[in-house]
Image: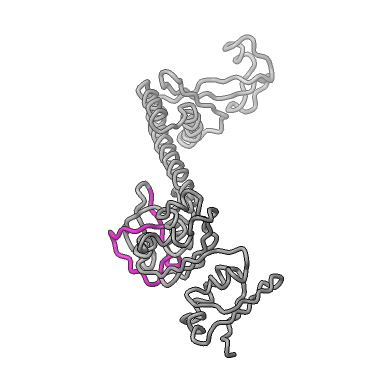
Amino acid sequence: MNGEFIEALDQIEKEKGIDKDVLLEAIEAALISAYKRNFSTAQNVKVKVNRETGEVKVYASKVVTENPKNECLEIDIDEAKSINRDLTVGDIIDIEVTPKKFGRIAAQTAKQVVVQRIREAERGIIYKEFIEKENEIVTSMIQRIEKKTVFVDLGKAEGILTAAEQVPTEEYKVNDRLKIYILDVKKTTKGPQILVSRSHPGLVKRLFEMEVPEIQEGIVQIKGIAREAGSRTKIAVHSIDESIDPVGSCVGHKGTRVQKIVDELRGEKIDIIKWSQDPAEYIASALSPAKVLSTEADEEEKTARVVVDEQQLSLAIGKEGQNARLAAKLTGWKIDIKSQSF
C-alpha cells in the first residue's frame, strides 16, 4: 500500500462519510488475521499502517525474560537490551517481523475491508432512509413477481409485497406503478429488508392526509379506520373547528377528493363518517349508509343494541355481514342489530 491508498481513504471519508481512522483500524485488524493465516504463526502480532505513507509493518510482541522457553512469545533480556537498553524483565517489546511478500497480501486484504465497509455504510444509509419512511406512502414500480410475492422498486432499495399484504381483488403486473405503504424495515446481513403493504389501513389514512388539506393542517382529525382491503373501508373523522364539516372536507367538491383515493385503491368503496364522543351517536353513524332508529349502548360491556327499520336491516348488516363487521371494528363495540318489527 502507498500514499495513493491513503488519499483514496480520504476521498471515501468525504464521499461516503466513513471515518478514515475507523477504516484503518479495521484494515489493521484484518491484516493480523491475514498474517497468521498466511504465515502459520503462533506469535502475538500487531500490524500498523502508516497514516501518511500507507506503509504496512508487522510487529511481534514478546515478553522480556531471562530464560526464554517460547521464542514466539518471549525474548532473552540480553537480546532485548541490544534493541533497547532501558528494557527490564517483564517488559513487552515489539519486534518488526514484516515478511517480504506481505505487501501484496496487505493490499488485497485492505481492498476487501474497504469494499465491505463501504457496502455496510451504504446499507446503513439505506436503512436510515427507509426507517424514517416507515408508516409512510411511497410510489413504486413493480420490478418482478416470484410465485405470490411482488417485488417493487423503491429507488435505492427493493420492497417486498407478500401475499398477506396484497389486496385480493388487485392484479399486479411488472412495470405497474402503485403507491405502497412502508410496513416494516428490518436490518439483515444482506442489507435492509423492506416490507410493504397495499392492504394496511395505514395506506388509506396516508392517502387522506395527502388529499385533504384540512387533515394536513390538523383541523380535521382521523379518529379511526376499519378496512377490508379491496372491498370497503370505513373512516371516522372529526373537526376541531365547528365551522368546518369533516365529512365534507374529506369528500371534496363533487366528491373529487375521495374519488382520487378510490381510484388509487382501484374502486374500493369508502364510507366517511362523523366521529362522535357519544357512543350511541358514533355507532349509528358507523352503520352508514343504513339509517338507525335507536341505539342503546352499554359502556361497561362495550355492547350496543341498534334498531333499524325492517327495510334497512339488510343494508345495516351488509353483504355477508360486512357493514356491521366494519362498524364494530371501527367503534370497538359489539353491535347487535335488530329490525323495528322484531
Which residue is painted at 55% across and 68% down in the image? 330
Which residue is painted at 69% across and 70% down in the image? 299
Question: Residue lying farthest top?
Answer: 85
Residue 84: x %, y % from top left:
59, 11
Identify the image quadrant of the N terminus: top left
User: What colouring does the structure picture have?
Assistant: one colour
Q: Which is nearer the eye, 120 or 111?
A: 120
203 lies left or right of 43: left
Please say whether residue 164 is one of the residues in the magenta stretch.
yes
Q: Which is nearer the eye, 240 or 52?
A: 240
The stretch in magenta equals 157-180
Vertical arrangement, residue 89 with respect to residue 331, above or below: above
Q: Which is nearer the eye, 324 or 149?
A: 324
Q: Which is nearer the eye, 165 or 278?
A: 278
Where is residue 279, by image quadrant?
bottom right
Residue 294: x %, y % from top left:
60, 78
Where is residue 112, by image quadrant?
top left
Question: Residue lying farthest left?
Answer: 175
104 lies left or right of 32: left
Residue 160: x %, y % from top left:
41, 58
Vertical arrangement, residue 269 with respect to residue 49, above or below: below
